[in-house]
Amino acid sequence: MTHATMASSLGRENFFWHKLHSLTGIVPMGVYMVQHLTLNSFSWAGPDAFNGIIGFFEGMPRHLSYGLKYGLIWLPLLFHMIYGLFIAARGQQNYTQKAYKYRENMYYTMQRLTGVIAMFFLLIHMGTTSVAAQFLGVEQTITYENWDRILTAPIVGVPYLGLVFYCLGIMACTWHLAYGIWNFCIRWGITISEKSQMGMAKFSLGAFVALTLLGWFALVGFLVPSHPLKGHKLEEHKASVSAPMPTEIAAL
Ligand code: HEM
Ligand code: HEM
């Protein structure tokens, strides 16, 4: 292989892996995070609703649940994380440009920084939920009842440190995804004109705010046991469990 062909094949390879990295950020990771935060907000509907969702995934046939978990979440995330670290390590910004470039450089740096924060957040989060549940069982780790403890119990003597950790971790992930959507659209030629890029910037900002609020909303759902909606649902559920079934009534 000549130098020229080797260089061009290396270039193609980098192009391919970079595009794949970009794609995995949106699909499946971005899509997964949106559905994950939405389902977590079922915390507001009470323990039965939230634990029901966990039970649904746990109750899937093994080949399906392992395929989804490892094939559609872990593998793309692992690739995105490792290649992302590689990009972040060799990334350079250029602060010597004009003023309007400064902001772009700041966002670019933030994208890499939030990627690294997301990595630490996810290592701890996945280790204490998904991985721990595999060894200790869901009842000891991730059911509704445990979230109150995870978020409020003192860690190194500081109460509510878990809540702070989750609030910040969610923010890092939502910023990373929101700005990522804007960058993705430019990279893939979806937004070409300056006007369309400005429009997408507004959409990304909206996505950042909406997804952060959704994640925080889900957290608060674990901490407000007296919320009227939750109380109402729980009472309704208790009544339906204790009420005699129509067949039992007929047998009386
Ligand atoms: C696990 C730790 C993660 C690391 C280390 C990481 C790292 C990175 C880096 C460095 C970039 C910039 C790539 C570039 O400049 O070309 C990036 C882009 C991106 N990431 Fe991540 N990331 C992580 C997790 C996530 C997660 C959880 C999501 C989704 C929720 C995500 C979604 C994206 C998106 C959408 C992009 C933009 C793709 C593009 O520029 O075309 N990342 N990531
Ligand atoms: C409101 C905050 C959050 C809560 C309450 C929460 C809850 C959970 C729970 C209960 C699990 C275990 C699922 C299982 O093993 O069945 C889990 C796993 C996971 N979470 Fe979160 N999560 C939150 C935020 C996030 C964020 C912001 C991300 C970023 C993308 C994320 C990514 C993941 C991943 C990748 C897994 C592993 C999936 C698996 O192994 O099946 N989570 N989370």
Image (cartoon, grey):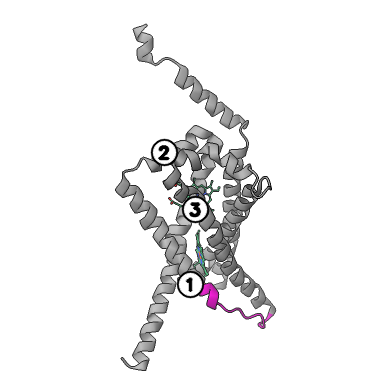
In the rendered structure, which amino acid carries the disc numbered 1? Answer: Arg
Q: Which residues are magenta?
A: 87-98
Query: At 51% across and 50% down in the image, what residue appears?
Result: 128
In the rendered structure, which amino acid carries the disc numbered 2? Answer: Gly
Ligand 1 neighbours mark 1 (CB distance < 8 Å): yes
Compare residues 229 and 75 and report the one nearer the observer.
75
Residue 187: numbered disc: 1
Residue 178: numbered disc: none
Q: Does 74 appear in magenta?
A: no
Q: Using a 10 Å C-alpha cutoff, classify the residue at mark 2 as few (fewer than 14 neighbours), some (14 to 19) or many (20 or more).
A: some
Q: Using a 10 Å C-alpha cutoff, classify the residue at mark 3 as few (fewer than 14 neighbours), some (14 to 19) or many (20 or more).
A: few
Tell me residue 103's x, y (percent).
65, 72
Residue to which mark 3 is pinned: 127
Task: Describe residue 54's horizontal placement relative to residue 2 as left or right.
Answer: right
Tell me residue 78's x, y (percent).
44, 63
Where 219 falls versus 228 (above or below)? below
Q: Does 91 appear in magenta?
A: yes
Task: Describe residue 155's horizontal placement relative to residue 63 as left or right.
Answer: right
Earlier residue among tags 1 and 3:
3
Q: Using a 10 Å C-alpha cutoff, classify the residue at mark 1 as few (fewer than 14 neighbours), some (14 to 19) or many (20 or more).
A: few
Query: At 56% across and 37% down in the image, what residue appears?
Result: 44
Where 5 falls versus 82 (above or below)? below
Tell me residue 19's x, y (percent).
42, 71
Task: State whether residue 132 appears in this view.
Answer: yes
Residue to which mark 2 is pinned: 55
Where 128 falls versus 139 (above or below)? below
Q: Marks 2 and 1: in contact by CB < 8 Å?
A: no
Earlier residue among tags 1 and 2:
2
Tell me residue 125's x, y (percent).
53, 52
Give the dominant element type of the magenta stretch: helix, strand or loop: loop
